[in-house]
Image (tube, helix red, strand yellow):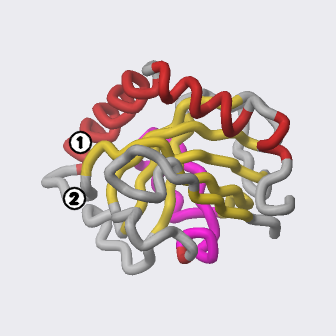
Amino acid sequence: MPFETLSVTGGSAMKTLPYFCRGEVVKGFGRGSKELGIPTANFAEKIVDRLPADISTGIYYGWGQVGNGEVYKMVMSIGWNPFYKNTKKSMETHIIHEFDKDFYGEILSIVIAGYIRPEKSFDSLDALISAIHSDIEEAKKQLELPEFQALRDRFFCSPSHKIMNGH
């Protein structure tokens, strides 16, 4: 299973943002599409375990690409999902695009550009779903800013993106 991570110094609160990683999409908890109506792509534990220490748990936004496909806006949860009381830390990416089918086994490349909020528990499933929709809208808004459009181009539209960390 190929994977790679790359941290790039940026002018953000977290020293390692923007943060790039790539890895195979694996089966998650099975809640994204079925229970929440918001499909997610999950990274293997070894990718999650390699996150820099200063990337705290919470909700992030950035860019994602499945295989060599189009680059789309994304929102990502990093953490234990307190509503579900997970015991395993996860990275769950919601690519803001409707795909025709699942893409388990495909390589997902992402760049985490910014932070939206800390993770928290919710009183109900509806409250969680509402918060996720708000996070998606915030991600869309932030990623329209010129600096984040340039970040997408830097990581995904330049020839150097094809050769990161020797891959």
User: Residue 66 or 40: which is nearer the viewer?
Assistant: 66
Range covered by the magenta-colored residues = 27-48
Q: Position of residue 40 (x, y in %)?
A: 54, 48
Residue sticking out furthest to the left:
123
User: Residue 33 or 2: which is nearer the viewer?
Assistant: 2
Task: Check contact, mark 1 vs mark 2: CB within 8 A.
Answer: no
Q: Amino acid at mark 2?
A: Lys
Q: Residues within 10 Å of mark 2 (few under 14, many from 20)?
A: some
User: Residue 56 or 25: which is nearer the viewer?
Assistant: 56
Residue identifier under label 2: 120
- Taking the spot 51% from the left edge, 39% from the top edge, the residue there is 62
Q: Which mark is residue 23?
A: none
Please, is residue 53 above or below residue 94 in the view?
A: below
The earlier-in-sequence mark between 1 and 2 is: 2
Q: Position of residue 117 (x, y in %)?
A: 26, 48
Dividing the picture into quadrants, the one containing residue 165 is bottom right
Position of the C terminus, as image quadrant, is bottom right
Does 141 sit left or right of 91 as displayed? left
Whether residue 157 can be seen here:
yes
